[in-house]
């Protein structure tokens, strides 16, 4: 069996997205010689193209796994579709993967709106939909979406932590929320509202949203300042998060912004804040920061850096997305190992729901992954971090993402 695979690009005649495949085989077949076929959707183009790094890293990760002998003697083949961050294109790509390409499961797909378009179909078809590149709270809803499972702390839980800190530091703070107008953004708004409750609801002085098709969010930032907001929860992807920060600087508005952790480690978000701290930026993390010298001798970070040097030498080793893919790829391999020779979809999902204190190479110390049939939140802790003009620096204690309201149950 060939262990080395190559990335093949194919163009669909009547769509704006491309399909990438590492090879062709039927994953459902049980022959030991048959590779395990896995599907993945990504934003390789469009407004969220910065996240295309996830697909490239996942492809490289499984190439490494295959060169090391695969999983239980089986190689892994990854089929990747560029859905351009467009929900209907994402749905069509997934349906093709399931019905024509015969993938065993979907793994690590990027985006809340895109995964939301996939989830009803995948759950009806009983196809595992695992370790998604989105923190939408719905992925923990094991009753409505029993075949879906996220990875990171949910957006709603993350926002609850931010709102708690705002009230602890400035109990009477006037709060504004700028969010993407979809489930991703609305989860952050719900998290803030969970913590404020009815008693403090009046402190949320302004809520504004944007569409991914918008050119800028300048007018939204102006309206937040005009409403008297003192602290902003910024639930945006990098392009728009960076615009909001830049506009605050242009206005000489020395506000505080809590930045969605999924956007924090992108140059598009922080370029306008380089060597500047007048706008206080705070975010969260659950993974080790490659730029932090604290981890230079850490075994997990060494393994990650060796992987990047060999398989992705042209990618930035300090970016957050490769770190994420290295962790989720390791977790999927654990699920497949636990599944053994029974690669039925039912057993894959059973194993995903039976992870016990799994330690991943670049998760922060003390964070381990545990799941259950009624617990589809693999990572449940968060570390706050603050921008110092050059990078993000952790501060405070590790925080648990405890639910404040009806959230994924």
Image: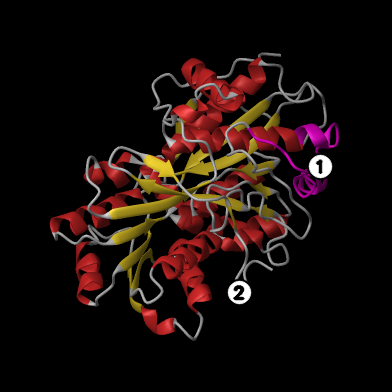
Q: Secondary structure at mark 1?
A: loop
Q: Check the picture and name the quadrant holding the C terminus.
A: bottom right
Magenta residues, start to end: 336-360
Q: Which is more N-terminal, label 2 or label 1?
A: 1
Query: Who is closer to the viewer here, 252 or 259?
Result: 252
As drawn, 341 above or below 248: above
Q: Secondary structure at mark 2?
A: loop
As drawn, 271 above or below 26: below
Q: Position of residue 336 (x, y in %)?
A: 75, 35
Q: Which mark is residue 344?
A: 1
Q: Which mark is residue 392?
A: none
- Image side of residue 327 versus residue 111, left or right: right
The residue depicted at 71 percent of the width and 17 percent of the height is 69
Query: Who is closer to the viewer here, 354 or 62?
Result: 354
The residue depicted at 48 percent of the width and 63 percent of the height is 159
- Image side of residue 161 versus residue 35, left or right: left
The residue depicted at 81 percent of the width and 42 percent of the height is 344
Residue 342 on the magenta segment: yes
């Amino acid at each position: 069996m060939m262990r080395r695979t190559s990335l093949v690009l194919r163009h669909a005649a009547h769509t704006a997205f491309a399909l990438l495949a590492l090879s062709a085989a039927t994953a459902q077949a049980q022959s030991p010689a048959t590779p395990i076929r896995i599907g993945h959707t990504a934003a390789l183009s469009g407004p969220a193209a910065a996240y295309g790094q996830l697909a490239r890293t996942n492809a490289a990760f499984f190439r490494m796994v295959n060169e090391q002998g695969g999983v239980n003697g089986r190689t892994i083949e990854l089929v990747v579709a560029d859905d351009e961050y467009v929900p209907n294109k994402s749905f069509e790509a997934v349906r093709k993967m399931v019905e024509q390409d015969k993938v065993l499961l979907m793994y690590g797909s990027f985006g809340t709106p895109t995964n939301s378009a996939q989830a009803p179909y995948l759950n009806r078809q009983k196809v595992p939909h695992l370790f998604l590149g989105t923190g939408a709270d719905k992925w923990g809803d094991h009753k409505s979406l029993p075949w879906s499972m996220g990875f990171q702390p949910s957006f709603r839980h993350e926002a609850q932590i931010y709102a708690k800190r705002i009230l602890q530091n400035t109990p009477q703070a006037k709060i504004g929320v700028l969010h993407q107008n979809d489930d991703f953004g609305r989860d952050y708004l719900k998290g803030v509202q969970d913590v404020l409750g009815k008693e403090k609801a009046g402190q949320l002085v302004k809520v504004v949203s944007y569409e991914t098709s918008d050119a800028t969010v300048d007018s939204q930032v102006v309206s937040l300042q005009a409403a008297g907001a003192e602290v902003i929860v910024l639930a945006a992807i990098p392009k728009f998060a960076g615009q909001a920060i830049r506009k605050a600087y242009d206005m000489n508005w020395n506000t505080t912004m809590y930045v969605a952790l999924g956007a924090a480690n992108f140059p598009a978000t922080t370029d306008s804040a380089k060597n500047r701290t007048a706008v206080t930026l705070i975010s969260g993390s659950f993974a080790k920061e490659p730029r932090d010298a604290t981890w230079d001798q850490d075994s997990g970070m060494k393994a990650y850096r060796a992987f990047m040097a060999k398989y992705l030498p042209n990618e930035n080793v300090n970016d957050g997305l490769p770190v994420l893919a290295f962790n989720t790829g390791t977790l999927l391999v654990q699920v497949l190992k636990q599944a053994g020779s029974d690669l039925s979809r039912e057993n894959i999902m059973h194993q995903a729901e039976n992870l016990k204190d799994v330690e991943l190479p670049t998760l922060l110390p003390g964070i381990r992954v545990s799941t259950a049939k009624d617990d589809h939140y693999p990572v449940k802790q968060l570390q706050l971090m603050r921008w110092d003009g050059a990078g993000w620096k952790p501060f405070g204690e590790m925080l648990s993402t405890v639910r404040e309201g009806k959230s994924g149950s």
